[in-house]
Image (spheres, rainbow, N blue to C red):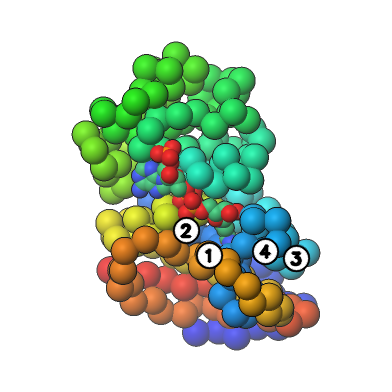
Amino acid sequence: MRVLLGEDADLSAVYAAPDQPWLRVNMVSTVDGAATGEDGTSRSINNGVDKVVFDLLRELSDAVVVGAGTVRIEGYAVGRKPLVVVSRTGSVPPTQRSARSGQVLMATVSTAPHLEEARSLLGGENVLVLGSHRVDLARMKDELVLRGFRHLLSEGGPHLLRDLLDQGVVDELDTTVVPRMISGSHRRITDGPPVDAPLRLATLVEEDGTLLARWFVEQ
Ligand SMILES: NC(=O)c1ccc[n+]([C@@H]2O[C@H](COP(=O)([O-])OP(=O)(O)OC[C@H]3O[C@@H](n4cnc5c(N)ncnc54)[C@H](OP(=O)(O)O)[C@@H]3O)[C@@H](O)[C@H]2O)c1
């Protein structure tokens, strides 16, 4: 384990992904564990240091995997990297409906009520049907790797992170802890039934009191 102070850390080297299929999840919280702030999104708790790592991890990824809830609540815009929206209902979030073909993919199930609509909005080849009632997230990773997306970044949200851990799909978890306490009732970085995922700390970077940790999930 390496502990580095921000000014000594070459973040591109710290966060370099191994040369193999790799899925990492990046999440931010306060010291008292809040994953959202007063506006109900992570925007009201993140800070400049977190943004640097957030942008870097996107840059290093081939595609970004996000739960439909987060895309809807945070109003994700169409980005430079392909976005893979995970959804049980198959409902394409409004901000992603006019994306160019291939910019947005959806991982969903055969019983999704909005499956046909998703196919017509995104193109059939961009809608991955990965189970009947539950999205098989391991198959999702395999399918995305087959399509050339070897380095995957998930930006949550809490339900998706919990399910990715439960299905043994996460290789790495990157957490930012911002130096704030906000109390109140806020979600944590995971939500849903219990999981138990042992982690090994690979790197800890401190910058202006913000703690950037790179954890590997013990498989
Ligand atoms: N602190 C952070 O780093 C961070 C990161 C991301 C999000 N957030 C915050 O978290 C909140 C959203 O939380 P959330 O738990 O609702 O987010 P989420 O996991 O992104 O959204 C849940 C929705 O995503 C889809 N989904 C998630 N997991 C799925 C799975 N395994 N299979 C199929 N569909 C799946 C479903 O969409 P359908 O309803 O379409 O089926 C589900 O209703 C927001 O306030 C956001 O700002 C914080």
Location of residue 218 in the rendering, given as x and y in whole percent from the top left corner: 32, 73
Question: From mark 3 to mark 1, how far is it between C-alphas?
Answer: 18 Å
Upstream in the sequence, badge 2 or badge 1?
2
* Marks 3 and 2 in Cβ contact (< 8 Å): no
- The first of marks 3 and 1 along the sequence is 3
Q: Position of residue 133 (x, y in %)?
A: 24, 38
Near mark 1 (Cα within 10 A), the count class, few <14, some 14-19 or many ≥20, is some
Q: Residue at x 51, y 67 (%)?
A: 188
Task: Check residue 158 in the rendering and tell me which mark sits there, or answer none.
Answer: 2
- The residue under label 3 is 47
Of mark 4 and mark 3, the one earlier in the sequence is 4
Q: Is mark 2 within 8 Å of ligand 1?
A: yes
Q: Position of residue 27 (x, y in %)?
A: 56, 63
Element at label 2: helix
Inter-mark Cα distance, 2 to 1: 8 Å
Q: What residue lies at 52% left-to-right and 72% top-to-bottom?
A: 214
Q: Are marks 2 and 1 in contact (CB under 8 Å)?
A: yes
User: Which amino acid, by three-letter code, is at mark 4?
Assistant: Gly
Q: Position of residue 59 (x, y in %)?
A: 63, 49
Label 1, ligand 1: CB separation under 8 Å: yes
Image-quadrant location for residue 10: bottom right
State yes or no: discs 4 and 2 in contact (Cβ < 8 Å): no
Residue beneath disc 4: 37
Q: Amino acid at mark 3?
A: Asn
Instruction: Tell us which disc is closer to us: 2 or 1.
Output: 1
In the picture of the structure, the residue carrying the numbered disc 1 is 187
Q: What residue do we see at 65% from left, 40% from top? A: 75
Mark 3 and mark 2: span between their CA atoms? Answer: 19 Å
